[in-house]
Image: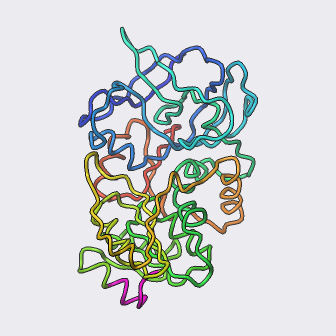
Amino acid sequence: MKTAAAVLVETGRPLAVTDLEIPELKPGQVLVDIAFSGVCRTQLLECRGYRGEDRHLPHCLGHEGSGVVSETGPGVSKVKLGDRVILSWIKSTGADVPGTSYPWGSGCVNAGGITTFSRQAVISENRLTLLKNDIPLREAAMLGCAVPTGLGAVFNTARPRAGESLAVLGVGGIGLCAVAAAALAGCMPVVAVDIRESTLHVARQMGATHCVISGNGNVRDELLRICPGGMDYAIEATGRPEVMRDALASVRCQGGAAVIVGNAHHGEQMQVDPKEFNLGKRLLGTWGGDSVPDRDFPRYARLLEAAKLDLRPMLAKIYSLDGINNALDDLEAGTVVRPLVDMTL
């Protein structure tokens, strides 16, 4: 049996959409019919070679999606045939299987514990979370990365109280989810910062009370104008070291905290004035929003089901698997917030 998949053969080159032979499942592996896959900036960095040397070429990509279980390997007990599931790079309970190898021509294509840029994919059991809620698989795909990272950076890492101020610097898919979480947490004001007015328009729909165009002056000064004395929290979601510095500079002394979410290019460094820490500011990192899939994904799904969280404004454009390179180009150009691939197209 074969599946269509988008394969990274060489960094800096378009992905090759080709047919791969599906291998026999190992213990702890699950075959999933992918319904939707998100396209994250992390994959863009991989494709363009911005994450350094890639020693696993050729390989499959994608770490966020939704689908239906079509087969289970020996020992799998977490899911069964026909279950709707969330696919995520964030590890949960279940077998941790390093990956698989898809026969391809005279060679093979590597894959990690999760890949989603294909119509079917062999997934490690611990990268799956059962989707019990009656929500569309279209929105459920975002529960694999954008939602847990963005919401988690607010709910789990920053942990603001109602009435505290929060700024999000960079409102792509993860940043928009952080904006939505800040609004849900009762933050005031909720400030979205980005270089594009079109993206800020979406941020307003997601709950931002104020918006700042970052290319029109000093971000710190603009945030201090909105919130004199500094923001209580700043979430950085661009991966740019200079924006990380802006996030730390914009929070208040004696307790303000900047949370770094974005992935910088390989080799880039962030320089920080130590006086920022003498002023009592905090610089926090986060791993996938510190979300625990089996604990947090059902919570996020309930927010979607209750219409407390609305992801539709950020999912305005749908692509086919054959159009995956267009999705990556549009993401890099900033003409789309969070590309979503529909495997039925």
- Residue 177 in the figure: left or right of residue 58: right
The stretch in magenta equals 222-231
From the viewer's side, name the closer residue of 186 and 279: 279
- Residue 183 in the figure: left or right of residue 49: right
Estimate the x, y position of residue 326 in percent, counting from the top left: 33, 45
Q: Kindly identify the residue that appears in the image at 46 percent across and 35 percent down.
A: 117
Q: Quadrant of residue 44?
A: top left
Q: Kindly identify the residue that appears in the image at 60 percent across and 53 percent down.
A: 291
From the viewer's side, name the closer residue of 181 and 142: 181
Q: Does the magenta stretch include residue 113?
A: no
| Scheme by which the image is coloured | rainbow
Quadrant the N terminus occupies = top right
- Residue 303 in the figure: left or right of residue 268: right
Q: How many marks?
A: 0
Q: Kindly identify the residue that appears in the image at 35 percent across and 24 percent down.
A: 58
Q: Kindly identify the residue that appears in the image at 70 percent across and 18 percent down.
A: 74
Q: Is residue 226 magenta?
A: yes
Q: Residue furthest front?
A: 278
Estimate the x, y position of residue 8 in percent, counting from the top left: 34, 30
Q: Which residue lies furthest to the top in this view?
A: 106
Q: Quadrant of residue 77?
A: top right
Q: In this picture, is 81 found above or below 105?
A: below
Estimate the x, y position of residue 306 in percent, counting from the top left: 71, 65
- Residue 87 in the figure: left or right of residue 339: right
Estimate the x, y position of residue 12 in percent, counting from the top left: 23, 37
Q: Quadrant of residue 106?
A: top left
